[in-house]
């Protein structure tokens, strides 16, 4: 399918904290180096070596607010007084160019992406059991017992969002879970809806 | 996911004649020996060694007509005076038991399956070009030029049904096409909708 220009897959990976989605995403990027990440719009000052349009899109607070009010973000957040947003236009353009993209975001963000870009593929990473989820959260060892109990309860409650996702990947073993996500990504690339170009070429009598 | 009892995937493979769907299905069954085929209902007499419920479900013409009129077939056909039908109940029961199934049927049949069992996964096998499609049909060498021209025109027209399918697999090289179909099958097994059992177990605090 080398000259088959297809639409990219927007892979959205999330799951409760402690499920290991960050580790899976890092491992996935190692075996799929072509995977694009989204470039955020930010109001913070560029640091040394940071290039506009490569590391971030740097904007003023006024420009950011205008984009936000115009609904141009898939999601946005304020962190330590700076604003960060994921611009829909950049994501859509990257997909149209045929690149697959990875978004590792929280559950509310993922559900919002699905609303704005219905062809997004939502993968929910879960631990093999709630017990293991709690053990993993405890192993971080950075919290008071009360804070830990709260995080465990919240992570357990987050499991309820599973049904709104497309795929379920059980992270019992990192390599296997990573391969599962890579497989889902490659399989989704074969969707007819992402291959309308191939479809037209074939009907026009051209070789794929 | 060994003790994760999931619903089976109903994989429906079709495509224009000359695309090589039969060859791909045969190769797929070699690497996925667990794949179940549907057992047809037939009105023809059992041959030596054929077992009811294993090779076919043997029925009288009256029984067959009653099943057909009650809408109990995914598809049915009359061949040389005998009736053959694919019983929906057997397919659904097999999927509920967690077995993945393969149906290799024509395009009209595939679209009908999707209507009756919306969770069916439809894979469209295409040749890399119409030219190659026509060459493959000609290579069979069993037809008059007129019959061949008709088959070519009909196979080309069948490409139009691609958009009603879920996945597109280009059969340029048998091994790669077969691996693509196997990948789609394994990926679809990870669908949240096929893993509601795992989902419930997790919420109930059980290990997957």
Image: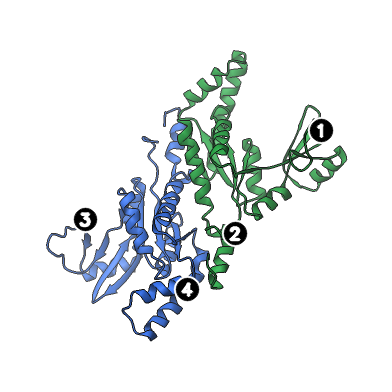
Chain colours: A blue, B green
| Image quarter (top left, top right, bottom left or bottom right) of the C terminus of chain A | top left
Which residue carries the number 4 mark?
A131
Which residue carries the number 3 mark?
A54
Cα distance, mark 2 to mark 3?
Answer: 45 Å
On the same chain, marks 2 and 1? The answer is yes
- Mark 2 or mark 1, which has the lower sequence index? 2
Cα distance, mark 3 to mark 4?
Answer: 41 Å
The chain ID associated with circle 1 is: B
User: Residue B13, image x and y in percent?
Assistant: 58, 39
Cα distance, mark 4 to mark 2?
Answer: 20 Å
Which residue carries the number 2 mark?
B5
Report if the CB atoms under discs 2 and 3 are less than 8 Å apart: no
- Relative vertical location of residue A27 with respect to residue B66 in this rendering, above or below: below
User: Residue B128, image x and y in percent?
Assistant: 45, 30
Q: Which residue: 82% across, 41% down? A: B64
- Relative vertical location of residue B15 with respect to residue A119 in this rendering, above or below: above
- Relative vertical location of residue B93 with respect to residue B85 in this rendering, above or below: below
On the same chain, marks 3 and 4? The answer is yes
Q: Which residue: 13% across, 59% down? A: A49
Look at discs 3 and 4 and give the one toward the viewer.
4
């Amino acid at each position: 399918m080398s000259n088959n220009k297809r639409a990219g897959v927007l892979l959205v990976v999330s799951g409760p904290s402690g499920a290991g989605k960050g580790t899976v995403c890092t491992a996935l990027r190692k075996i799929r180096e072509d995977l694009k990440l989204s470039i955020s719009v930010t109001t913070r000052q560029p640091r040394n070596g940071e290039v506009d349009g490569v590391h971030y899109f740097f904007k003023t607070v006024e420009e950011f607010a205008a984009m936000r009010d115009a609904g141009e973000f898939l999601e946005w957040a304020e962190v330590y007084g700076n604003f960060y947003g994921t611009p829909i236009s950049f994501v859509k353009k990257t997909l149209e160019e045929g690149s697959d993209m990875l978004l590792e975001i929280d559950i509310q963000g993922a559900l919002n992406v699905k609303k704005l870009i219905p062809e997004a593929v939502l993968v929910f990473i879960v631990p093999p059991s709630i017990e293991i989820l709690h053990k993993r959260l405890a192993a971080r060892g950075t919290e008071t017992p009360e804070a830990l109990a709260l995080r465990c309860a919240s992570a357990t409650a987050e499991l309820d969002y599973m049904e709104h996702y497309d795929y379920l990947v059980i992270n019992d073993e990192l390599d296997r879970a990573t391969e599962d996500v890579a497989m889902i990504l490659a399989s989704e690339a074969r969707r007819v809806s992402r291959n309308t170009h191939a479809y037209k070429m074939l009907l026009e009598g051209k070789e794929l």
